[in-house]
Image (tube, helix red, strand yellow):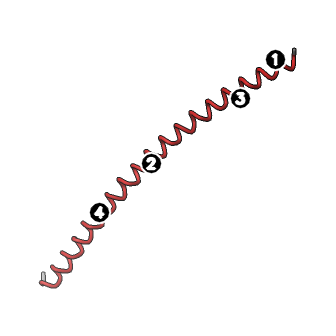
Amino acid sequence: MSEDSFQSLSDKVDELIDLCADMKRENQLLKAGAGSWVSERKQLMDKNKTAKTKLESILVRLKAMDQS
C-alpha cells in the first residue's frame, strides 16, 4: 500500500470517527428532547383531565339548577 493510499484511508477513518461522534451527540440531544416532550405531554394530559372533571361538575350543577 502506498503512502498516499494509506494517508487517504487514514483521513477517511478520521472523518468517520468524527461523524460518529457528531451523530452520538445529536442522538443524545434528540433523546433528551424526546424525554422532555413525553413529560410535557403527560402534564398536558393531566391538565386536560382536570379541566374535563371540572367541566363535568359544572354541567351537573347546571342541570340540577335547571331541574329546580
Q: Quick one: label 1 or label 3, which is nearer the N terminus?
A: 3
User: Which residue corresponds to mark 1?
Assistant: 64
Quadrant in which the C terminus is drawn: top right
Q: Quadrant of residue 6?
A: bottom left
| C-alpha separation, residue under disc 1 versus residue under disc 4 | 66 Å
Whether residue 58 sits left or right of residue 18 in the image: it is right
Q: Amino acid at mark 3?
A: Leu
Q: Amino acid at mark 4?
A: Cys
Q: Are marks 1 and 2 in contact (CB under 8 Å)?
A: no
Of residues 7 and 31, the one nearer the viewer is: 31
User: Which residue corresponds to mark 4?
Assistant: 20
Tell me what residue is drawn at x 74 percent, y 25 percent.
58
User: Which residue corresponds to mark 3?
Assistant: 55
Tell me what residue is drawn at x 27 percent, y 68 percent.
16
Q: Amino acid at mark 1?
A: Ala
Where disc 3 sits, the SS reads helix
Mark 3 surroundings within 10 Å by alpha-carbon count, few (fewer than 14), some (14 through 19), many (20 or more): few
Q: Nearer the viewer, mark 3 or mark 4?
A: 3
Where disc 4 sits, the SS reads helix
Of residues 3 and 22, the one nearer the viewer is: 22
User: Which residue corresponds to mark 2?
Assistant: 34
